[in-house]
Image (cartoon, helix red, strand yellow):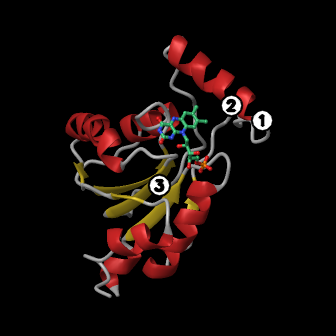
């Protein structure tokens, strides 16, 4: 199906929850998730080390470099990431503001301890305006039910 081949699924995950969510999304979409990774990897063991890294990024206003992904053929991009401090990670900011996404549609899904995707949307909308792409409302993806509900417009159950 043409539309399907123009859809991609990308996620950023440090401790694995967003990866698990992306794999579930991928089963519905019949797509293999692609990991967006930092050139300088995030610490995966030790919450305090990860917090130290993200604090440094915030304090120093860093936009961490990512390993580029080829999305030029993509029309619709599902993009999963954890919520950090009530917003998308700075790696996601860098990806969305330095990748040419003009004319494309991005559908965000987030994992979190409790934050909803709505906390991240104002940031995403600002970057979408600047980059001339469209952000859909997306969904929170902390449980299989949330993922099923979040995808229901694409896959009526
Ligand atoms: C630095 C940091 C900040 C976080 N901030 C929030 C937050 O604002 N709201 C929330 O609900 N969860 C927050 N969390 C929890 C993560 O969003 C949650 O553990 C996420 O599912 C991790 O995704 P991952 O396993 O794919 O890396 C934070 C975690 C870290 C490490």
Tell me the CA gap for discs 2 and 3: 19 Å
As drawn, the label of residue 80 is 3
On whether ligand 1 comes within 8 Å of the CB at mark 3, the answer is yes
Q: Residue at x 68, y 48 (%)?
A: 15
Left or right side of 12 for 77:
left
Q: Residue at x 61, y 56 (%)?
A: 17
Left or right side of 65 for 111:
left
The local secondary structure at tag 2 comes to helix
**Residue reaching furthest right?**
45
* Quadrant of the rendered image holding ligand 1: top right
Which of the two discs, 3 and 1, labels the residue nearer the N terminus? 1
Q: Are marks 1 and 2 in contact (CB under 8 Å)?
A: yes
The residue carrying mark 1 is 46
On whether ligand 1 comes within 8 Å of the CB at mark 2, the answer is yes
**Residue reaching furthest top?**
60
Task: Point out residue 104 in the picture as x, y percentages from the top left corner.
Answer: 27, 56
Examine the rendered structure and indicate whether residue 83 appears above or below residue 7.
above
The residue carrying mark 2 is 50
Tell me the CA gap for discs 1 and 2: 7 Å
**Disc 2: CA contacts within 10 A as few (<14), some (14-19) or many (>=20):** some
Task: Point out residue 50 in the picture as x, y percentages from the top left corner.
Answer: 68, 31
Q: Residue at x 42, y 69 (%)?
A: 147
- Given residues 11 and 68, the one toward you in this image is 11
Examine the rendered structure and indicate whether residue 150 appears above or below residue 1.
above
């Amino acid at each position: 199906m043409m539309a399907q081949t123009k859809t991609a699924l990308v996620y950023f995950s440090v401790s694995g929850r967003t990866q698990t969510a992306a794999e579930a999304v991928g089963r519905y979409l019949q797509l293999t998730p692609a990991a967006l990774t930092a050139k300088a990897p995030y610490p995966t063991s030790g919450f305090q080390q990860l917090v130290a890294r993200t604090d440094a990024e915030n304090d120093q206003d860093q936009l961490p470099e990512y390993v580029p992904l080829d999305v030029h053929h993509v029309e619709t991009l599902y993009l999963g990431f954890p919520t950090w401090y009530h917003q998308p990670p700075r790696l996601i900011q860098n990806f969305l503001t330095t990748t040419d996404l003009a004319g494309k549609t991005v559908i965000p899904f987030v994992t979190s301890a409790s934050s909803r995707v709505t906390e991240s949307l104002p940031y995403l909308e600002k970057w979408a305006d600047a980059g001339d792409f469209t952000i859909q409302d997306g969904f929170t993806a902390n449980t299989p039910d949330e993922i099923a509900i979040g995808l229901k417009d694409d896959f009526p159950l």
